[in-house]
Image (cartoon, coloured by chain):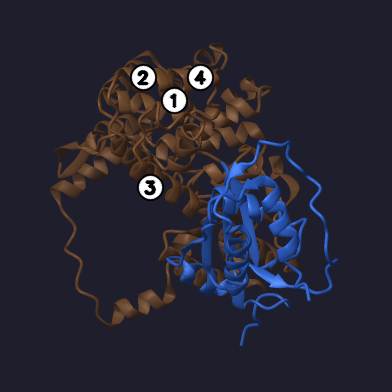
Amino acid sequence: MTRNFRINTPGVVHEMIDGEVVIVNLDTGRYYSLDSVGAALWGQFEQYHSVEAITQWVQLQYEDATGTIQADVETFINQLLEDELLIVDDELGGWQTPDVIPAAGVQKPFAKPELNTYTDMEELLLLDPIHEVTDEGWPETA
Amino acid sequence: MSIEDRVLCFCTRPSFTPEYQSQVTELCQTQQVDWQAVFNAAELHHVSPLVHHSLSQLNAETIQLPGDVRKQFKTAQIHNVMLKKGTHRTLTQVLGKFTQANIDVMLVKGTVLNLLVYDKPWYMISGDVDMVIRDTEEAFKSGPNGFIAEEIDKINTFRNKFQQHMEFDFWSHHDMTMNGILKISGDFLWRRAKKIEAFNNPVFVLPPEELLLSAAINACRKRFFRLKALCDIASIIESYPDLDWTYVCQMAHQWRAHTILYTALIMTERTLGCTYPKSVLKKLRVSKLRERIILNSIDRLLTHSLTSSAQWSSQHLFGRNFSQALKLTYATYPFPVLIKKLCEIVYAWWDPPSPILPPVEHHIEMKSKNPIGEIL
């Protein structure tokens, strides 16, 4: 059965900067960066929600010289799921065929996507006392 | 200026145009650039993400940017984005609570520039979040929302550990008035402020003319030598081509900040470049003597390297360190304030304060009270 997933918003926020994606998981306090293939892949998660669709998109865009695209994409997506940057959401639409097909001969060389993880600011992101304030407002005085 | 200084200044310009890109490429092809020094200086001047963005538009091989320095720039950029995302969430939460409690808040300094001026706030470092609450400190603390001050204090104490200050002030901001040195009325600022929607909440912001004056005052607080502060000025001028300069000059006089604005404009023009009507300097009516002192100080300051700590090195006088940058800053102070400041320095030298005693119980008590009065 095809597993559907999506970016774990609103806890996960991201920004594309100069071809690189910076992702912050506000719920775990970790932040990440992706470049080249990883950044391009992340950009597709808004549109494609299954390993099959993403793999097909990658195979259209990149030259599979080593024949590892499928395995590498699966490993990458599993890592994103493990770090709760993506979450499984079966309510999403199922298979969607990538429609952007590059002209023949313009496929780029594929490189295994790498997720760089940073944990140095977990405390700042997680423990800010403002997060303790409830939806009702500031805590009442005793 | 050294080649590193020139590269740094070009890359800190708000618009890194193709013309500047070619100039940097040309510089790097004709001379050897110490890129590590450029990165260190960019960090010192709080502009490393912006410089990284500018450099990323050039061919790394042509400019001979070493991989390890590139990585340092990249890491600084990633760190900055993370901080901004985190701050965005915290600020949204804080402002939401103020909205619930019906308290008007004005965003000032870097926070408001990120909102209104910078197209790409991700490239701008702003460690602090500065806000002004529309109330006096006494009324706020003794009113029904007084307990919020303690909550804010908790947030500040926590964030200060990470150098991510969230500063609240009442009615007007102490950085804008330079702790009372400048004649800036909170009533006036609130009358001029406009309500907008930001961070999912209504907030007040100042119009561009006051933003410019505030940025010039901030540059003065950074001794006119932090490129980030000068970049703020250049960016405001570039973002608002219809600035009412006559009004800016009038207000600068009213606030007693005309010499500060004069110096800030010249420093920005000489380091990063910025275009403003030449009549502005005349309209600021800086006295000939002071003008000469300021221009002389700027010349001397710019003979130091931006990429070294030379500008912070100083002469000792009356037990104080007097750097060139500090001399320039003092040269812009209103005359009575300058005299008062110098008297304080001489007095402190003549009769030094007693050494601070080690912390005892009393100190713990003070700590628990927290510097609310100072921060809030």
Disc 1 to disc 4, C-alpha distance: 28 Å
Q: Residues within 10 Å of mark 2 (few under 14, many from 20)?
A: some
Disc 2 to disc 4, C-alpha distance: 36 Å
Question: Can you give x and y, in whole percent of width and height, for residue B335 in the image?
Answer: 36, 30
Give above or below for B332 relative to A135.
Answer: above
Identify the residue under disc 4: B284
Q: Is tag 2's residue or tag 3's residue first in the polypeptide sequence?
A: 2
- Name the residue located 28 percent from the left edge and 83 percent from the top edge: B361
Disc 3 to disc 1, C-alpha distance: 19 Å
Same chain? Circles 2 and 4: yes
In the figure, residue B148 lies in which quadrant? bottom right
Label 2, secondary structure: give it: helix
Give above or below for B65 relative to B95.
Answer: above
- Name the residue located 65 percent from the left edge and 33 percent from the top edge: B208
Disc 4 to disc 3, C-alpha distance: 42 Å
For marks 4 and 3, give the one nearer the viewer.
Answer: 3
For marks 2 and 4, give the one nearer the viewer.
Answer: 2
Which chain is disc 1 placed on? Answer: B
Question: Can you give x and y, in whole percent of width and height, for residue B158 in the image?
Answer: 46, 70
Amino acid at dot 1: Phe
Q: Residues within 10 Å of mark 3 (few under 14, many from 20)?
A: some
Q: Is tag 4's residue or tag 3's residue first in the polypeptide sequence?
A: 3
Identify the residue under disc 3: B72
Amino acid at dot 4: Leu
Residue B10: mark:
1
- Name the residue located 66 percent from the left edge and 61 percent from the top edge: B92
Label 4, secondary structure: give it: loop
